[in-house]
Image (tube, grey):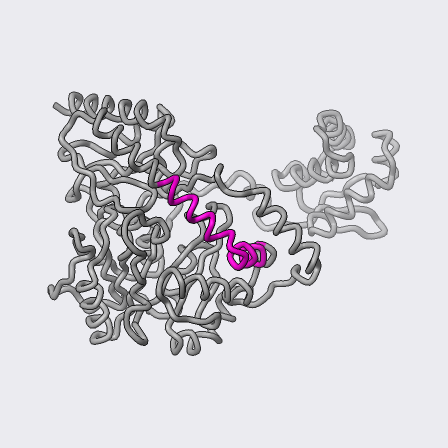
Amino acid sequence: MNIPDDAFYGLVAKAVKMRDGETLQRTIYHALRHAILNGQLQPKSRLPGSRAIAQQLLLSRNTINAALDQLATEGYLLRDRQGSQVATLPNSSAIETAAPSVINLPPHLAQLPAGTRRDSPVLAFTPGTPAVNYFPLPLWRRLLDRVWRDEGSTLLGYGDSAGEESLRVAIARHLALSRGIDCDASQVVITEGAREGLNLCTQLLSERGQPVWFEDPGYFGARSAFISAGLPIHGLPVDDEGMCFTSSELPTPRFIFTSPSHQYPLGNLMSATRRLAWLAFARQHDAWIIEDDYDSEFRYSGEPIPAMLGMVPNAPVVYLGTFSKTLFPSLRIGFVVMPKALAKSVQPAIHSLLRGGHRVEQRTLAHFIEEGHYARHLASMRRLYRKRQAQLRVAIHQELTLPHRISAGEGGMHLTVKIAGIDDGKVVDLARQFQLAPAALSRFYLDPSQGETGLVLGYGNTSASRFVAGVRTLNRLIEQTRRGSA
């Protein structure tokens, strides 16, 4: 043995003395494992017998044997009738200390837009966050309890890869009434939020290297999904009618990504003329329009705008929706609606790519929709957000001293305030010190240095009582950064 008995017993005794909440068995196991890995106990060294160790340390022999058996099971020791011997491990002395100096990540990760910090509790003016404190949680709990009571253990398996049929039926009915989409449950696939829906589109309908035409400015999450799938992004500008229709020399797209009902982040509504032009273009060039129906449920003037998927028969459109904005973000339930022929074609692939899950939550949500609670909640939130938006406009008018312009704003949960010539990224970074989390408009552009500047102010999660003080603080930070750069 390479280590004297006294040293061996001292090593184990010290570990036992310093153990912090661990069982004696685990303490001895960890002490010996560490000694083997760092070379204190070298290969082929023989350990004292379990009886001798137990007597020396005044411990149970069963405890000692359990620790030694675990080490033998994992391959650190060899045990036989003659006792325990340290196994020969390749480069065992360097395993715990060696650390690579450079981690080489895939190059495409450098192209991803900066991630959005998810704070809890959510900071004021965070875009895209609903008023979760208004969600009818007691009602949701009753529905959840009912599902558990009525169906219980039958819902503990994976379930249908496309999602619970009851929820897909409920979504199809809701979309027919609210979005003018004539579909059935077979065309709906439940996903873990809109982002997984995007990932599913790239897996089903594209190959690496195929181009994407993308709103510029546009949604961070969609950019990340396309970049991760190896799809090059080409930005198209956005004007008052939505994403500009262009016959430029860009390569023919596989996907055309747009949020026509409430462009994110500018808030513009795509005109019917432009929608029809895009539908004709996509059909002519064998491209797919990915319609992100962002904030479509929160429109504050006029009638609801029908989705592009429902405008013409067999539209080349895949429709994305989510309940993260209308209910609460941690629900993580979204959905994809496909044309009937596409849904039939990809059904085998759906079963390979997805696993059913969150069955209880999906069944609960189905009841929430079918029993009318969803429609009532949406109506309540429209009233709240309409009022908050009006109050935020007043606060901006009163407190923002620099020339500015509010972009669109006929719906949704945020206002985009364009302010030329400011370092909006720096303002946003400083604002976090004051518990404010607006977004920088320039960061939504593919090239932030070429984009417009301003602030995206979410009001869904922010009480109106905080508007005046919050905008006043932002105005001070804007002035501060302008003086600092002068």
Q: Is residue 191 above or below residue 407?
A: below
Q: Is residue 52 above or below residue 206?
A: above
The image shows residue 382 at horizontal and vertical percentages of 38, 45
Dominant secondary structure (helix, strand or loop) of the stretch shown in magenta: helix
Residue 121 is left or right of residue 78, and the answer is left
Q: Residue at x 42, y 74 (%)?
A: 343
Q: Is residue 36 above or below residue 223?
A: above
The image shows residue 443 at horizontal and vertical percentages of 25, 42
Q: Between residues 93 and 468, which one lies in front from this camera angle?
A: 468
Q: Between residues 481 and 88, which one lies in front from this camera angle?
A: 481
- State yes or no: residue 384 in magenta: yes
Q: Between residues 258 and 226, which one lies in front from this camera angle?
A: 258
Q: Residue at x 15, y 44 (%)?
A: 450
Residue 453 is left or right of residue 105, and the answer is left
The image shows residue 32 at horizontal and vertical percentages of 70, 38
Quarter of the image for the C terminus: give it.
top left
The image shows residue 440 at horizontal and vertical percentages of 26, 37
Quarter of the image for the N terminus: give it.
top right
Q: Residue at x 68, y 41 (%)?
A: 33
- State yes or no: residue 313 in magenta: no
Q: Which residues are magenta?
A: 361-385
Q: Is residue 161 above or below residue 333?
A: below
The number of numbered badges drawn on the structure is 0
Q: Residue at x 28, y 60 (%)?
A: 257
Residue 362 is left or right of residue 286, and the answer is right
